[in-house]
Amino acid sequence: MPPTTLENATCTFCGCVCDNIGLEADGDRIVKTKRACGLGEAWFKNHTAERLYPDALIDGKPASVDEAVEAAADYLYQANMPLVYGLSNITCEAQRKAVALAELVGGVVDSHTSL
Ligand code: SF4
């Protein structure tokens, strides 16, 4: 079976979010990258499409995504001042959604850079 190739993949390892990465996969594993820096290459090569974990966890127990979304909504609804935190390895579009969510639930936003 020939390797699967993809041009212009997006690396979300760091804030640069390079979107011109070439990838070559052998089955579930990425075996070659083009135009990625050393960090990006390591990030791509150590991620697979294998399903090693359940779709979601609630209190440490496997759950469906729908159940997890409902549980998350309940936590947010009951919280006094929810913190939307992280945002370092996600796209601008996802950051925009996170800020909108914080505004919707009356929460605050912080990133890992505050450490
Ligand atoms: S390829 Fe390197 S510089 Fe570009 S997003 Fe990935 S880690 Fe960052």
Image (cartoon, rainbow, N blue to C red):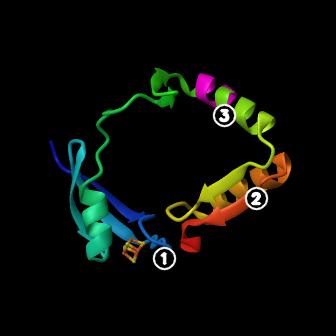
Secondary structure mostly taken by the magenta-highlighted segment of the chain: helix
Q: Which residue is mark 1?
A: 16
Residue 69 in the image, given as x and y percentages of width and height: 64, 31
Taking the image in four quarters, ligand 1 sits in the one at: bottom left
Direction left: furthest residue: 1
The verdict on label 1 being within 8 Å of ligand 1 is: yes
Q: Is residue 9 magenta?
A: no
Q: Earlier in the sequence, mark 3 or mark 1?
A: 1
Foreground pick, 24 / 95: 95
As displayed, is residue 59 above or below residue 94?
Answer: above
Give the magenta range.
Answer: 66-70
Amino acid under label 3? Ala
Please, what secondary structure does the residue beneath circle 3 have? helix
Callout 2 environment at 10 Å: few (<14), some (14 to 19), or many (20+)? some
Left or right of residue 49, residue 99 in this image: right
In the image, which disc is placed on residue 72? 3
Q: Earlier in the sequence, mark 2 or mark 1?
A: 1
Q: Badges 2 and 1: C-beta atoms under 8 Å apart?
A: no
As displayed, is residue 62 above or below residue 78?
Answer: above
Amino acid under label 1? Cys
The verdict on label 3 being within 8 Å of ligand 1 is: no
